[in-house]
Image: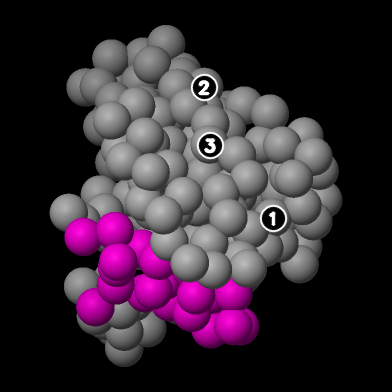
């Protein structure tokens, strides 16, 4: 029996997955929650084998919840379950310690297979995500530059949000900025870090401990 804790803000999908797991042999849904604000406490309560984690939820994002869970319970397997395929979220999830990254689909069997793979010690990725990860490594998009990088306080704040996997709109809301201003700051961050994309900025921020 594989015990599962689900974090999913879409009520319809949450109920659908609950019904599916309740009727799937070998699966036990220990808890299903609409946000991850108390994710660590929920993990402490249920001690699940696998956590199925959405990314974009009210309050704490799935990437932030993943990082907090892994900081306290490093052995807990967290499977990211999302519609997002953009590279900086994928990289943030991988760097945060995710055991897999599965795209939401109409077929819950895909999710159950991913959960089983992760539970067995595998690192499941939907085919489209696996291709992106391969491309990121093949492109070798970051060259280490040990030079000191002077970012403003606001730029560090925006960069921290990027590392957490937030979209530009989410960054704007979190930092009380307009989306246009977020674009402005990110442009300057790219110039200072000598990068051309969000995934590159995330990698350099993590490598050089800029946030």
Q: Say if the magenta span includes residue 115.
A: yes
State the separation of the CA atoms marked 2 and 3.
16 Å
Residue 49 visible in the snapshot: yes
Observer-nearest residue: 63 or 207?
Answer: 63
Residue 79 as seen in the image, left or right of residue 5: left
Observer-nearest residue: 178 or 132?
Answer: 132
Q: Nearer the N terminus, badge 3 or badge 1? A: 3
Q: Which residues are magenta?
A: 107-127
* Residue named by callout 1: 48
Residue 60 as seen in the image, left or right of residue 23: right
Q: Secondary structure at mark 2?
A: loop
Q: Whole-percent x and y of residue 147?
A: 60, 64
Whether residue 33 is situated above or below residue 43 in the rendered picture:
above
**Callouts 2 and 3 close, C-beta under 8 Å:** no
* Residue named by callout 2: 59
Q: Nearer the N terminus, badge 2 or badge 3? A: 3
């Amino acid at each position: 029996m594989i015990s599962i804790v689900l974090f999913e803000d879409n009520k319809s999908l949450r109920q659908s997955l609950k019904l599916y797991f309740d009727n799937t042999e070998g699966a036990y849904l220990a808890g299903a929650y609409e946000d991850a604000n108390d994710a660590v406490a929920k993990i402490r309560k249920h001690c699940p084998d696998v956590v199925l984690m959405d990314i974009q939820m009210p309050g704490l994002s799935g990437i932030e919840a993943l990082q907090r869970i892994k900081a306290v319970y490093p052995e807990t397997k967290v499977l990211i379950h999302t519609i997002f395929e953009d590279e900086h979220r994928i990289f943030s999830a991988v760097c945060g310690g995710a055991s897999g990254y599965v795209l939401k689909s109409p077929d819950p069997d895909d999710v159950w297979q991913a959960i089983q793979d992760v539970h067995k010690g595998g690192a499941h990725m939907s085919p489209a995500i696996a291709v992106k990860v391969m491309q990121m490594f093949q492109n070798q998009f970051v060259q280490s530059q040990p030079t000191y990088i002077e970012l403003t306080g606001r730029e560090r704040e925006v960069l921290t949000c990027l590392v957490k996997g937030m979209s530009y709109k989410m960054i704007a809301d979190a930092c009380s900025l307009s989306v246009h201003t977020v674009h402005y700051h990110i442009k300057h961050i790219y110039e200072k870090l000598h990068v051309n994309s969000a995934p590159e900025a995330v990698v350099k921020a993590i490598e050089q401990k800029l946030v």
